[in-house]
Image: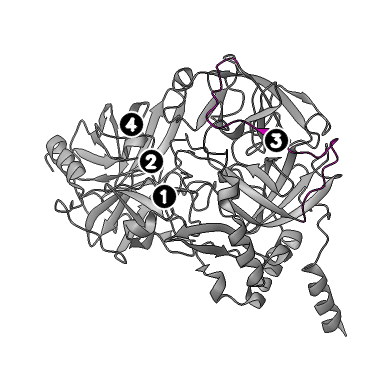
Amino acid sequence: MEKYLYLIFILLLCDLPRNIVSRVPPSINNGDDNRIIGGYNATIEDFPYQALLMILKGLQVFQCGGSVINSQYILTAAHCVIGAGLIRARVGSTFSNTGGRVYTSFRFGTHPLYNPVTSDYDVAYVRVVPRMSFNGTNVRAVELAPRDSAVAPGTIFTVSGWGATKESGEAVQNLMAVKVPVISSEECMKSYSTITARMVCAGVPQGGEDSCQGDSGGPAVSEDGVQRGITSYGIGCGRPGFPGVYTNGDTEVIVEVVESWYTEEEEESLIKHGVAGRHLCHHQVYKQNSMSWYIIGLDSSDYMSLTKMKVSQLYLFCLYSVFFLLFADVSSKKHERREKKTEAGKIVGGSEVSIKDFPYQARLVIETGEGYFGCGGSIISDTYILTAAHCLTGANKLFVRVGSVNADEGGDLIESTDFKQHPKYNSSVYDFDVGLVRLPSAIAFDNTKRAIRLPVRKTSIPAGTRVTVSGWGATSENGEGSDTLMAVTVPALSNTRCRASYRALTQNMVCAGVPQGGKDSCQGDSGGPAVVRGNLGGVVSFGYGCARPGFPGVYARVASPPIRDWIKQNSGV
């Protein structure tokens, strides 16, 4: 009898009404980059286009904002939906945890040019079923800006959402809003070096008024009621000199793009194959050679064509996603900020190792005007350490520890103020991400301290080659650094395959990771060694998150001629 009751329960679960209240606690502190600081309480009648998105990623739930742009589509930020398996959208309510109506969506996708490293083209759609009912009072669409209409400095943006009211604070239950003036791109570039034509900045010089965590993806609307921006990112919340950055709604990024995401022909094809409506469980469309492929279920590495997938299989994926959304022990997680210097590499899924097995490993503690942070490095001679260029940005002095398995004790500690980045280092895309540290005294080599061989110029790293990465970085995304040296071995990927995850990949980079995730470098490992057949094949550079399915780690390719030549010219190695 219990078995039949359980079966009935499961079947009912797959057809749950869409107005079920989310089970995420209202104090969830997640989302990605932005939220409301220095604002005021608002009502949904003031912002009837405002949507709250609760986004399932694995077993964790994140909060973002969104804006209703027609009866079936919600506009949000691309970084909100990357890695998502299911989204619940609440519209028509002033409150984040009650009221209005909740819609479930398995159909969402990012702009095809979205770059998770630079946050360029940070826009996505969420398609809900059934269509939203507009009443003109608390649910209606926002007007989008005409294509290529300029946003003049001084334009007042009203930004709204349920994000935190202070940096690292808790999300709020009552809708809030804040008014901030747009600043010129030239002025904004003084704070952010990677501003593009698809971005617009808004804020006050003294800080104190801004969006914050949990507001990502929400609307930035000008005084004429037109949405001209999407909350994207920023350093901190309401900090003086660091305005909020918004995807520019006046460019081709948004205007006329929703229709290109889903054509009538695609919709008819989906219905023809019996997978329309709430049973459609894909979360991103990847188009190549005029063929649409769909990322299915909770594993973003599982690509298959709809024409090859049974409806029963798709139904089970949907059931699995809904089950975990409602009953998993979810916890919040804040995305690492793009401008953080420790955003790149760290060891996840590895094991503790001995310094005698990795005697070339160095630990760098970098002093900047804003404090200290850790990176990795490799001994390449008795007086030179190779590390990542982004580790050296803003550095005043470095403390280099060699010959110890421990991050903070043992071995030899050497202070240096003599270091340089590759002259072609590009902080926007992490190209040429290598740097050199010159030590004032020579390292006395022994079985815990010795140099690693560098590869011959133009040496290739074929796909499938084993790459061993080591360091003291975090052992989980947004986790704490390790006190003991750790290492993990992952296979190299071809650049062609890696570009499916990172469009800005160059010939000076190499990727390594496993499709299912779970093994990677993480925060604090940046600059550390990636060893191939006993040679230093790469330098830990960057990645989206840590060990996420479908997002391998990216490493500066040491054998790339412009990198290898620079190392030799400046170190003699």
Give the extent of the magenta segment: 130-154
Q: Which residue is mark 2?
A: 375
Residue 181: percent from left, percent from top: 61, 18
Residue 289: percent from left, percent from top: 42, 61
Q: What's the residue type where badge 1 is placed?
A: Tyr
Could you tell which of marks 2 and 1 lies nearer the N-terminus? 2
Q: What's the residue type where badge 2 is placed?
A: Cys
Q: What's the residue type where badge 3 is placed?
A: Gly
Q: Please tell me how many numbered marks the rendered image carries.
A: 4
Q: Secondary structure at mark 2?
A: strand
Could you tell which of marks 4 and 2 lies nearer the N-terminus? 2
Q: CA distance from mark 4 to mark 2?
A: 10 Å
Quadrant of the frame with the N terminus: bottom right
Q: Which residue is mark 1?
A: 502
Q: Residue at x 66, y 23 (%)?
A: 222
Residue 470 in view (yes/no): yes
Q: CA distance from mark 1 to mark 3?
A: 28 Å
Residue 163: mark: 3
Secondary structure, magenta segment, majority class:
loop
